[in-house]
Image: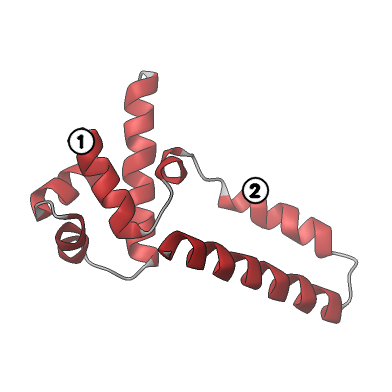
Amino acid sequence: MDKRENLYGIIAGNIRQERKRLHISQGQLAEKADVSVDTIKSVENGRRAMSLDTYLNIVQALGAAPFSLMKQRHTKDYAERFLFLVERRSQWEIEFVLHMVEQILEGHDSYLEG
């Protein structure tokens, strides 16, 4: 697999993951992105490359940043890192950290919507 195919696979997986995180169907994403359902299905299954316009429409429909869907995600690594960081912290400190992360992410989401 060359670098381009790998990138297409990463983008396809991230689009599918983000769509599911938002609890929207392929049809709903297609409607929001102004593309066909077949396009979304083909893109998510890695059977089809897409134009820059289609990619940007999907990015906007998902409320994501363009480069965020191009990054390979390693959520297990982040979870392990977080657990290591809070291992010796009190429950109050952990709750505080979680609250702060939630506030940051809500601000980030609000910024993307605006």
The residue located at (36%, 46%) in the rendering is: 13
- Going from N to C along the chain, the mark reached first, 1 or 2, is 1
Give the answer, above or below, for where 27 lies relative to 58: below
How far across and down, in percent of the image, does residue 70 sit?
42, 38
Specify few, some or many for label 1: CA neighbours under 10 Å numbering under 14, 14-19, or 20 or more. Answer: some
Give the answer, above or below, for where 95 lies relative to 1: below
Looking at the rendered structure, the kind of residue marked 1 is Met
Residue, far bottom: 92
How far across and down, in percent of the image, does residue 16 sit?
32, 53
The quarter of the image holding the C terminus is: bottom left
Q: Depth check: give the residue in front, 56 or 84.
A: 56
The residue located at (38%, 56%) in the rendering is: 17
* Element marked by disc 2: helix
Q: Is residue 71 visible?
A: yes
Specify few, some or many for label 2: CA neighbours under 10 Å numbering under 14, 14-19, or 20 or more. Answer: few
Looking at the rendered structure, the kind of residue marked 2 is Asp
- Separation (CA) of disc 1 from disc 2: 30 Å
Q: Depth check: give the residue in front, 105 or 98.
A: 105
The residue located at (39%, 21%) in the rendering is: 3
* Element marked by disc 1: loop
Residue on which the image places disc 2:
77
Residue on which the image places disc 1:
50
How far across and down, in percent of the image, does residue 26 sit?
19, 60
The residue located at (50%, 62%) in the rendering is: 111
Give the answer, above or below, for where 33 lies relative to 106: above
